[in-house]
Structures are given as structure tokens and as C-alpha cells.
Image: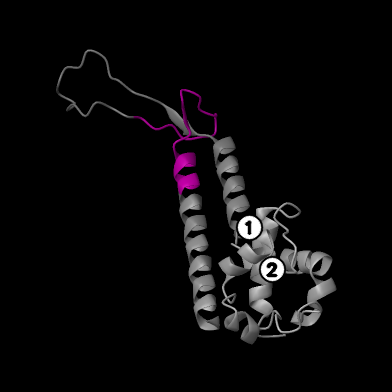
Amino acid sequence: FLARSSLSRLLHSLKMSRVAFVAGAALLLGASCFVLPGSTPSSAPEVQVSTGRSAGAAAPEAESTTAAFSPLALGAALGLLAAVVGSRPALAADLENGEAIFNGNCTACHAGGNNSIVAEKKLKKEALVQYGKYDVQAIITQVTNGNGAMPAFGEKLGPDDIEDVANYVYSKADKW
């Protein structure tokens, strides 16, 4: 079970890295489209676009356009790229938050993965496997709805906090 969990975390991390890379590339592509026609700074080189007719051909009037890259657009793109690349990837679970939620709401009965109310229903891996709860979704359901002597926390905690504490319990189950 632990290897599958580690593999799924690795795959999720790789997926998030790919998303960040694609977002950064899209930002740079978008920034490259910020060309301001007709407003050339005096130090920027001008780009002439002509119609492609030969010099001998009579052209009523040569069509040309002047364009310059905007430094403001480049700054905005680099700022957005830094925000995307520098931010922590959005992980499915925040184990630090899960630990804080656990310590504030669960340790009265489940300190150290034990159970002070029903001794055999511990949060240790062996007991979770025995009772069909060694699965993050099963733990989420248990925390949300309660069962037996355990109260429901679905109205007290938000879904993200419940998911975080469930992932924390799952990650600690074989370490308690």
C-alpha cells in the first residue's frame, strides 16, 4: 500500500510540474504577442514589413508597419512566470495542516494512533487494514460522518481540512 501511495504522490508531483511548465510557456507566448504597433521608443530598432514586390515593379505606395516590443509586457510575463514557478505546487493534501487538525481535534481519543474509547480500533495500519479503513477515502468518510463512538466532524471541519487530516492519518498509520 505504501509503495502505491508513494508512486501516486510522485505521479501527482510530476503532473503538477508539467502544469507549471505549460503555464509558464503559455505566459511567455502570450507576452510575445504584446507588440504595440506604431509606438517605437527612440532606442528600439524599427522593423520594416514590406509587400514583397520586386524593386522593378511599380507599387502605388509601399506598405510598411513599425512595431516595438513592450518592456512592460516582458516584465508582466516574467512576473507571472516567477509567481507560477516559485509557488508551491497545489498538492492534494497538506500534511502539516492535517497534523495541526489532528492535534486539535483527534488526539484526545487517538494520541499516538491509539484509541482511548474502543481500544481495538486504533489508527495503526494493522487495525485500519482489519476494519477496511486503510484508504484515504474511507478515512475521509469516517471523519466526515463519524461511526459508533466517533463523532462526525463534517459540520465542524471543511472538506479540505478533512482531506488533510485523512492523508495525515494514512501517512502515519505505519509509523505509530
Using the image, determine if residue 61 lies above or below residue 42.
above
Using the image, determine if residue 59 lies above or below residue 162.
above
Using the image, determine if residue 119 lies above or below residue 92.
below
The kind of residue tagged 2 is Leu
Most extreme residue toward the left is: 57
> Who comes first in sequence, dot 1 or dot 2?
1
In the rendered image, residue 42 lying in the magenta stretch gets the answer: yes
Give the residue drawn at x 43%, y 29%: 67
Kindly report which numbered mark, 1 or 2, lies closer to the viewer in this rendering: 2
Q: Residues within 10 Å of mark 1 (few under 14, many from 20)?
A: few
The kind of residue tagged 1 is Gly
| Label 2 sits on residue | 95
Locate the C terminus and report the quarter of the image it occupies: bottom right
Which residue occupies the foreground of this view, 151 or 35?
151
Give the residue drawn at x 64%, y 56%: 87
Q: Can you tell which quarter of the image residue 105 is in?
A: bottom right
Q: Can you tell which quarter of the image residue 132 is in?
A: bottom right
Residue 15 image position (x, y, % from top left): 48, 63
Residue 108 image position (x, y, % from top left): 85, 72
Side (left or right) of 5 relative to 55: right
Residues rendered magenta in the picture: 26-48
Q: Secondary structure at mark 1?
A: helix
Give the residue drawn at x 16%, y 17%: 58
Which residue occupies the foreground of this view, 11 or 173?
173
